[in-house]
Image (cartoon, grey):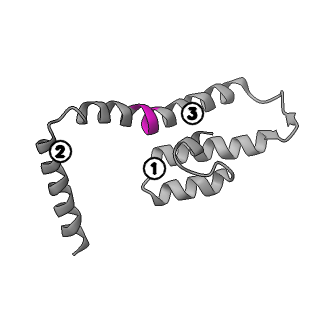
Amino acid sequence: MLCKHLGESGEDLNGDIANLVKKGLNAVVAKSLDVVRVIGNESVHPGSIDLNDDKDIATRLFDLINIIAEQMITQPKHVEELYSKFPESKRAAIEVRNTKALADTEK
């Protein structure tokens, strides 16, 4: 569901993570997603949950999900909220600067 919210299909977690990495996903978030994916694949299978799993690991997985949500959803919303309050002229100047910087790096 989280990958789907981030614009991916939600059908194949491994593929979704790969696509997000191609789009520049933060390395910490990518590792967090992979930890959740790998442990989840090893621990939960359709129709069965291993009740002997370590409670500490489950708690830490929730912490990782919170890290992912914080970096991919909460922080961008906070930044966009403040950025959108800039006058249009300021946003346009920033866009010109960024376009020029990208063009310079492609040379």
In the image, the segment drawn in magenta is: 70-74
* Amino acid found under the numbered disc labelled 2: Arg
**In this rendering, is residue 85 above or below 15?**
above
Magenta region, main secondary structure: helix
- Of callouts 3 and 1, the N-terminal one: 1
Residue 95 % position (x, y): 19, 53
Q: Are marks 1 and 2 in contact (CB under 8 Å)?
A: no
Mark 2 highlights which residue? 91
Q: Which mark sits nearer the N-terminus, 3 or 2?
A: 3
Q: CA distance from mark 1 to mark 2?
A: 28 Å
Image quadrant assignment for residue 86: top left
Q: Earlier in the sequence, mark 1 or mark 2?
A: 1
Q: Position of residue 47 (x, y in %)?
A: 88, 37
Asked whether, in this view, residue 92 is left or right of residue 84, the answer is: left
- Give the side of residue 11 with respect to residue 95, left or right: right
Q: Is residue 9 left or right of residue 25?
A: right
The local crowd at label 1, few if under 14, some if 14 to 19, many if 20 or more residues have their Cα within 10 Å, is: few
Q: Is residue 79 above or below residue 102?
A: above
Binning the other alpha carbons within 10 Å of mark 2 as few (below 14), some (14 to 19) or many (20 upward) gives some
User: What residue is pinned by disc 1?
Assistant: 27
Nearest the eye: 80 or 27: 80
